[in-house]
Image (cartoon, rainbow, N blue to C red):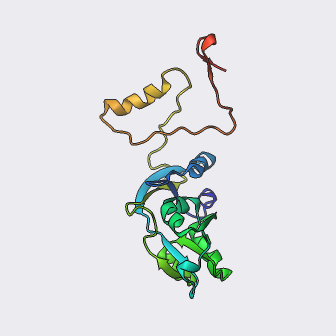
Amino acid sequence: MQAVERWLVDRAVLPIENSLGGSIHRNYDLLLRHRLHIVGEVKLAVRHCLLANHDVEIEGLKRVLSHPQALDQCENTLTKLGLVREAVDDTAGAAKHVAFHKLKDTGAVASSAAAGIYGLQILAQDFQDDSDNVTRFLMLAREPIIPGTDRPFKEGPGVLFKALAVFALRQINLTKIESRPLRMQPLRASDDSNGGSPK
């Protein structure tokens, strides 16, 4: 995202939601931190593999490395194998670490492409718990496709209803709405003895 902001690249691709793991909250926070615009989205089927160095068998593995979302998406399979999970920044990085350190008791959950790049063998394909595993990615750019006409609502009673009413009036169905706390503002509660005004 910083590369887009610094004009080093034109677009960034950010995973935002997975059909098994749900919302990727860390990336929602990144959207707030970086002033980029959503200019598209794509949904991709996720096909995880269990990777290891050559001459390593699945029975010899004790732990597995991967991104937290990938570990969540393979939770049942990993539990059946009795493997200790260790979270790292990304799936490709997990594969690279296993290959670079020539680990014999550690595998990685990553793509078949990562196996080819880092010279690892594929111990198991379609390693995710659900074959219908899909991740939604956002495409981000410096400039919006349509110049900004969005204006934030002021806080107050009924604001959420007013914001959502436009969708209902146009017969548009929402699949999800999610609120995130603002890091710089404490959570607020309403004081019933004070006429419902926030504390």
> For this rendering, which residue is in front, 163 or 61?
61
Drawn side of residue 132 relative to residue 9, left or right: left
| Residue at 54% over, 37% down | 179
Left or right of 120, for residue 40: left
Does the image show residue 10? no
Picture quarter with the C terminus: top right
Q: Residue at x 53, y 69 (%)?
A: 81
Give the image location of residue 120, x and y in percent. Answer: 55, 82
Which image quadrant is residue 155 in? Answer: top right
* Observer able to see residue 35: yes
Q: Position of residue 149 (x, y in %)?
A: 47, 37
Establish if 107 lies above or below 140. below
Judge by depth and name the residue closer to the eye, 63 or 186.
Answer: 63
Q: Horizontal and vertical percent for residue 86?
A: 64, 65
Residue at x 63% of width, y 78% of height: 105
Q: Is residue 183 above or below residue 196?
A: below
In the picture, which quadrant includes the N terminus?
A: bottom right
Which residue is outermost to the bottom? Answer: 55
Q: Where residue 156 sits in the image (x, y, percent)?
A: 55, 22
Number of numbered labels in the structure image: 0
Please identify the quarter of the rendering in which residue 161 is found.
top left
The answer to whether 194 is drawn above or below residue 125 in the figure is: above
